Amino acid sequence: MNLSRLDLNLVVALRALLEERNVTRAGQRVGLSQPAMSAALARLRRHFDDDLLARVGGHYELTALGQVLLDRTSTAYDVLERLFASQADFDPMGESREFKLIASDYAVAVFGTELARVMHEEAPGIRLRFTQPPTTVVDDTATLLSTTDGLLMPHGVVSDFPATDLYQDSWVFLVAEDHPSVEDRLTRQDLARLPWVTYQRTYDAPAVRQLGMLGVEPRVEVSVDSFQVLPLLVAGTRRIALVQARLARLLTPLAAVRVLEPPYEAVPLQEAMWWHPVHTHDAAHIWLRETAARVGRRMAETKEEPGTS
């Protein structure tokens, strides 16, 4: 494929056509007349040797190839947009733009709130948008990173992409304040016999993978996509939950739970910001990474005390 022979404006037209499934509406969306958009569709059909949009009754539906191209075109558009938005210089006080970060509600609560505060003071025109990581984050990391500015994720979950370390955290367990069979400490036997409530992919965490080496298989009773509701699902039950110590300190005042240290030497969590190599030399992204690292260093000065609330 010789990219020099392609008109990249067709990416814009293709995305509009596939999403709108209507030539007139697609033209209005990108500022082209109906004849111009029809001509773009004809060029795209010749290129792909496929109708892309097939008339069914009084409307159009995507062909099989059109359906495949729908997600790929959206990703390609985002990559091109970020590529051509790259800057040689960046003035945080004078810029107006949005950074998109993929982060769990844990990372937003513990780190994102402080990052947002610093940006509010140092770059008032900058906007931050946090979105939850999909369950496919490990399986399709490259595609995910190509459409965002960064991914907040601990080491040991993703790899093979550039990253900057932010801060360390430790793991603690939550149990109900009035748990009938757990006193001042947990045992490995407790971890095997008691029901668990977990984050959607807690098994990705090295601290959980350690349990398999110890012969402990967590019996998951409830799984959720939010770390912050874990205390509420533990309070008043026999369940246990593994959470980050920094988050536990924030959340334990909200629910009748106790914080206990793991009955094994849990691997610490090293949070990092991961990005796609396309961003590495972009001045705006360099500023974002440096600011995030600076916020992380400040957090590192605040030592957690696992086992206390």
Image (cartoon, rainbow, N blue to C red):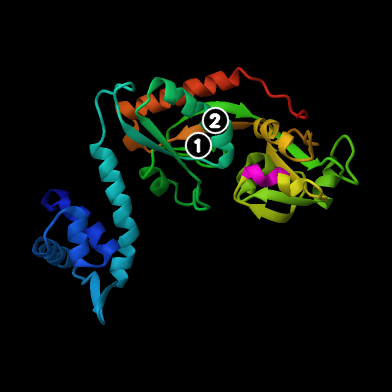
Q: Are marks 1 and 2 in contact (CB under 8 Å)?
A: yes
The residue at the point 44 percent across, 46 percent down is 141
Which disc number belongs to residue 92? none
Residue 230 in the magenta stretch? The answer is: yes
Disc number at residue 152? 1
Magenta part, dominant SS: helix
> Is residue 286 something that shows in the picture?
yes
Helix, strand or loop at mark 1: strand
Of residues 286 and 34, the one nearer the viewer is: 34
Would residue 7 be found to the left or right of residue 222 on screen?
A: left
Q: Residue at x 72, y 43 (%)?
A: 231
Query: 217 above or below 293?
Result: below
> Which label sits on residue 111?
2
Disc 1 to disc 2, C-alpha distance: 9 Å
The answer to whether 257 appears left or right of 269 in the picture is: right
Residue 228 in the image: above or below residue 51: above
Q: Which residues are magenta?
A: 227-231
